[in-house]
Amino acid sequence: MNLYKIRKGRRQNLEECLILDYTAFCHVLLGTVSNDVYEGVRAKLSGKDEKPKWQPSKLELVTKEMVDRCFNKSVDEKDWIFLKLPPRSNLVDDIVSSKL
């Protein structure tokens, strides 16, 4: 995922990069592709085995489709809210006017 973000981010502006990161982060938390984050936390915090069972078990088994799914802007989750950033000019105006 990080290699994908680096390669894609080279051609994006800041807003696009933030949206890409947010989208990937949400897919990780939702377990769209795998539950590895939760498995890693479970293995570390349970103190029993500390041997996470990754899915897929090897990096070579990660497919392009799996990576692409992490950056898909549509999610089958009713509470999903896609990141929308305010226009930069409005944000700057709000900050300046709030200090006056």
Image (tube, helix red, strand yellow):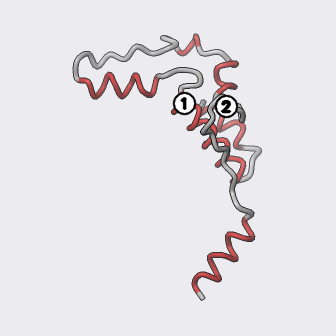
Q: Nearer the viewer, residue 26 or 16?
A: 26
x, y percent for residue 43: 32, 22
- Left or right? Give the position of 12 relative to 40: right
Q: Would you identify the image quadrant in which residue 95 lies?
A: bottom right
Check the image and report above or below for 14 versus 36.
Answer: below
Q: Residue at x 48, y 22 (%)?
A: 35
**Mark drawn on residue 75:** 2
Residue flagged by tag 2: what amino acid is it?
Val
* Mark positioned earlier in the residue sequence (2 or 1): 1
- The amino acid beneath tag 1 is Leu
Q: How many marks?
A: 2
Where in the figure is residue 61, as x and y percent of width and height? 58, 10
> What separation in Å lies between label 2 and label 1 (alpha carbons)?
9 Å
Q: Quadrant of residue 40?
A: top left
Q: Residue at x 65, y 37 (%)?
A: 5
Please say if the residues under marks 2 and 1 sit with CB atoms less than 8 Å apart: yes
Q: Nearer the viewer, residue 50 or 38?
A: 38
Q: Which mark is residue 30?
A: 1
Label 1 neighbourhood size at 10 Å, few (<14), some (14-19), many (20+)?
some
Task: Look at the picture and state if 84 lies above or below 42.
Answer: below
Q: Residue furthest left?
A: 48
> Residue 20 location in percent, x, y?
67, 41
User: Which part of the image, by quadrant, shows the C terminus?
Assistant: bottom right
In the displayed structure, does residue 22 sit left or right of residue 37? right
